[in-house]
């Protein structure tokens, strides 16, 4: 197992470096001179040149790129925001908890509620409970998440006044973002775990378990669920990517000063260090989560485990 | 001679009955039927509807700014007093065209990459798949945001951004399919009679591995429309005054509290369209692979 973990971690670091190169290049390609954007069109040529030298944008592309990679991966420094002169790392640290609350709780809701709903639908296959769950899931898979969020704000914050519509002043502010952020994921997860359960529900060993008179609850929990787990875990990984990417839009709707909003403001102001920092952070977050997921896979799937724990390869 | 003919007729009979079987299953599935009808209705409405609303795309009455639904304007008016229904129908053309183009382009490129990786195997496969790993290390939405920031706003940059985000998924899926088909006898047979690699990939492998991709592509038309709307909403992608659905949402977002219909109407249009596409995708999946049917 150790070898597998090391191999995966090394690969993850490589992917992060590649992601940083991609982001840096994309932001480098953004049209317009950053110095001119910061100082305005009226600024004199000397001032502009001085600004360029200060930002380092007067150097060739490759040197800028290697300089950036050197600072990020060897010194763990994302540089300063061009516009606000604040270190990106410090800002990320401040904003991290807010994004983590939304993402983390959203993920937990996604896994727990989604899987339970999926199992519920699968065990009631063909009955009205199944159809109702799946119709609701279908609606939430289809509707854009930020629109659902707006509708929730109108209903729960404005009309019923149960929760504040935006901001982060009290903990109740987080209720709507967490729920709205996870609804789409819950729906996808419910559909996936339902079909994963249906795959195993007709397997011979389930018939055997029932034939020997096992109680239905135990059949579902001990015989079906472990075998349906693989596709469900894969779904969770996809859900995580969605939570990360969705956080940008969601934080915008609820005016939560999190990392997603930071990135979007960076994109709008062409603030390269901010955008690169946020994206590298998001990529690291997703990669670590994928790593954990893969390890779960390896742990749960005896075939992968055997391949790495024994001396010879089992294929 | 007659033997060959008989065989051929038997073959064609089986082939047509397989297609017929597929069509029969597709029509039988209520989700596919509902999705198809809804989808046709939406496409028709967007194509010919704008000519029947009685208003022009840029018709404007400033006294009706943000007016709610009424008999003359059944979906109300937008922030500048333009008829919402007309703009919605025109906008549907953008959204649908953008969703379909990006999803299909992404699928075509993805399938080609997956075919090459899966069929050649070895070093080529390793390189391609590692490249895809890097590509998809950034979630699709993030990649779209970055590409459209770099490329600028407008129709084609947005299509490009959406396409780039959807390539790795198709490539992975196709490669997986190819891997399970590669060792089959018909491939060996084709190789033994010296078919070219291109012909094996596209004439023999492709028809056998494309089924899941068709379903995925159908579904991704929906998610692409959603993604395009999100892009417009956060100030990238297509921007107002273009009537794309996301742009309509972005246009109305400052008046959510006072005039909810500005947000509700385009949102419902997006949700309904994506719902139709997803229903169709579900139906296709069930019809193509009865094993997966719930």
Image (cartoon, rainbow, N blue to C red):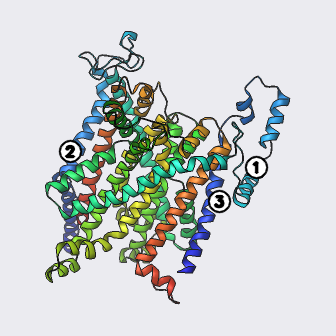
Q: Which residue is mark 1?
A: A64
**Chain on which label 3 sits:** A
Vertical order, A29 against A192 (above or below)? above
**Kind of element beneath mark 2:** helix
Q: Which residue is mark 2?
A: B34
**Chain on which label 2 sits:** B
- Quote the CA–CA distance across marks 1 and 2: 55 Å
Vertical order, A68 against B203 (above or below)? above
Q: Which residue is mark 3?
A: A17
**Kind of element beneath mark 3:** helix
Quadrant containing the C terminus of chain B is bottom left
- Quote the CA–CA distance across marks 2 and 3: 47 Å
**Which of B112/B5 is in front?**
B112
Q: Position of residue A180 (x, y in %)?
A: 38, 45
Quadrant containing the N terminus of chain B is bottom left
**Kind of element beneath mark 1:** helix
Residue reaching furthest right? A46
Could you tell me which residue is drawn at 52 percent across and 45 percent down? B144
Q: Which mark is residue A55?
A: none
Q: In this orientation, does residue B165 appear?
A: no
């Amino acid at each position: 197992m150790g070898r597998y973990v090391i191999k995966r971690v090394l690969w993850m670091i490589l992917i992060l470096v590649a992601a940083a190169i991609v982001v840096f290049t994309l932001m480098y390609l953004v049209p317009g001179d950053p110095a001119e954007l910061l100082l305005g069109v009226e600024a004199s040529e000397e001032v502009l040149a001085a600004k360029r030298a200060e930002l380092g944008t007067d150097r060739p592309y490759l040197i800028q790129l290697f300089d950036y990679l050197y600072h990020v991966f060897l010194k763990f420094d994302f540089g300063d925001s061009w516009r606000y002169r604040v270190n990106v790392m410090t800002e990320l640290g401040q904003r991290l908890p807010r994004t983590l609350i939304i993402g983390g709780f959203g993920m937990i809701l996604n896994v727990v509620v989604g899987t339970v709903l999926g199992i519920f639908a699968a065990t009631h296959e063909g009955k009205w409970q199944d159809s109702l769950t799946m119709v609701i899931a279908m609606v939430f898979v289809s509707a854009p998440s930020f629109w659902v969020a707006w509708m929730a704000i109108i209903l729960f914050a404005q009309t019923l006044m149960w929760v504040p519509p935006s901001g982060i002043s009290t903990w109740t502010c987080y209720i709507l973002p967490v729920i709205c952020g996870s609804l789409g994921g819950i729906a996808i997860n419910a559909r996936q775990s339902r079909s994963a359960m249906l795959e195993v529900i007709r397997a011979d060993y389930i018939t055997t378990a029932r034939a020997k008179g096992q109680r239905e609850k135990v059949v579902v929990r001990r015989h079906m669920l472990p075998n349906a787990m693989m596709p469900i875990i894969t779904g969770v990984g996809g859900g995580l990517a969605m939570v990360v990417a969705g956080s940008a839009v969601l934080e915008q709707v609820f005016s939560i000063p999190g990392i997603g909003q930071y990135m979007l403001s960076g994109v709008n102001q062409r603030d390269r260090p901010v955008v690169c920092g946020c994206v590298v952070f998001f990529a690291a977050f997703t990669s670590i989560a994928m790593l954990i997921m893969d390890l779960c896979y390896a742990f749960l799937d005896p075939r992968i485990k055997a391949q790495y724990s024994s001396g010879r390869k089992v294929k | 001679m007659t033997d060959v003919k008989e065989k051929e007729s038997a073959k064609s009979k089986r082939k047509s009955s397989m297609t017929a079987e597929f069509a029969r299953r597709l029509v039988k599935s209520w989700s596919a039927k509902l999705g198809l009808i809804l989808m046709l209705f939406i496409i028709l409405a967007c194509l010919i509807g704008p000519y029947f609303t009685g208003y022009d795309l840029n018709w404007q009455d400033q006294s009706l700014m943000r007016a709610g639904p009424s008999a003359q304007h059944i979906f109300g008016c937008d922030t500048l007093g333009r008829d919402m229904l007309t703009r919605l129908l025109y906008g549907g053309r953008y959204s649908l065209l953008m969703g379909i183009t990006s999803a299909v382009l992404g699928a075509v490129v993805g399938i080609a990459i997956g075919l090459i990786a899966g069929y050649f195997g070895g070093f080529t496969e390793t390189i391609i798949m590692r490249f895809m790993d890097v590509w998809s290390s950034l979630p699709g939405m993030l990649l779209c945001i970055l590409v459209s920031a770099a490329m600028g706003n407008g129709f084609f940059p947005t299509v490009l951004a959406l396409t780039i985000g959807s390539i790795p998924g198709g490539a992975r899926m196709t490669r997986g399919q190819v891997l399970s088909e590669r060792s089959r006898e018909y491939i060996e047979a084709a190789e033994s009679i010296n078919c070219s690699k291109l012909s094996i990939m596209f004439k023999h492998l492709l028809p056998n591995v494309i089924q899941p991709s068709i379903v995925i592509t159908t579904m991704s038309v929906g998610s692409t429309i959603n993604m395009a709307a999100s892009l417009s909403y956060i100030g990238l992608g297509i921007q107002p005054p273009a009537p794309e659905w996301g742009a309509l949402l972005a246009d109305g977002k400052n008046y959510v509290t006072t005039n909810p219909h500005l947000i509700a109407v385009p949102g419902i249009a997006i949700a309904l369209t994506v719902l139709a596409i997803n229903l169709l995708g579900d139906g296709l999946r069930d019809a193509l692979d009865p094993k997966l049917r719930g």
